[in-house]
Image (cartoon, helix red, strand yellow):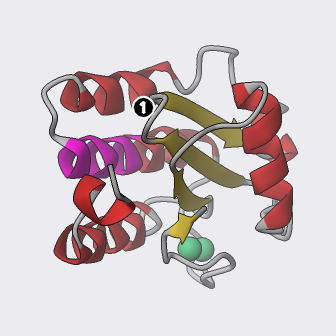
Amino acid sequence: MKVSEFITPEDEKEIVEAIKEAELNTSGEIRLHIEHTCTGDRLDHALEIFEQLEMHKTELSNGVLIYVSIDDHQLAIIGDKGINDVVPKDFWESTKDEIISQFKKGHYKQGLINGILEAGKQLKQHFPYQSDDTDELDNEISKG
Ligand code: CA
Ligand code: CA
């Protein structure tokens, strides 16, 4: 499946809007990376992408990468150190559930949007939106 079949350019706009909306809840920064196949270990690879995208460059170390590979159905959520230091281990479960439950029905755009909004809600508990917020990490979808 092509990335453009997985999410159309129209879907992409809605997803970027969801990232903007989620980031109005929190000082955390959410990014989405989509590619065809995950090489090697899912979490190791997602961590590499996190580094490639320079997602550690946030003041509070609270960037979050949602990683999806289309052909081999991998999903990983990587939070930066600032998040991992303060949240329980199962912190991203509700976000994963939102994504997976929609993906199972073939509703890819909706899964990503629901997941992004849920991640924003979860982050809000620990990293509320700051009045002097800046958009520290690009909201555009990264594609491999
Ligand atoms: Ca921000
Ligand atoms: Ca952002």
Per the image, the residue denoted by label 1 is 95
Q: At 78% from the left edge and 63% from the top edge, which residue is drawn?
A: 55
- Residue 26: x and y in percent read 53, 59
Label 1 element class: helix
Magenta span: 108-118
Q: At 44% from the left edge and 36% from the top edge, which residue is drawn?
A: 71
- As rendered, which of 73 and 79 lies closer to the eye? 73
Instruction: Quadrant for residue 9, please give it.
Output: bottom left
Eyeballing the image, is 38 above or below 96?
A: below
Instruction: Quadrant for residue 90, please give it.
Output: top right
Eyeballing the image, is 83 above or below 54?
A: above
**What amino acid is found at the position of numbered circle 1 in the picture?**
Thr
Eyeballing the image, is 54 above or below 73?
A: below
- Residue 111: x and y in percent read 26, 40
- Residue 39: x and y in percent read 73, 36
Whether residue 86 is visible here, answered yes or no, is no
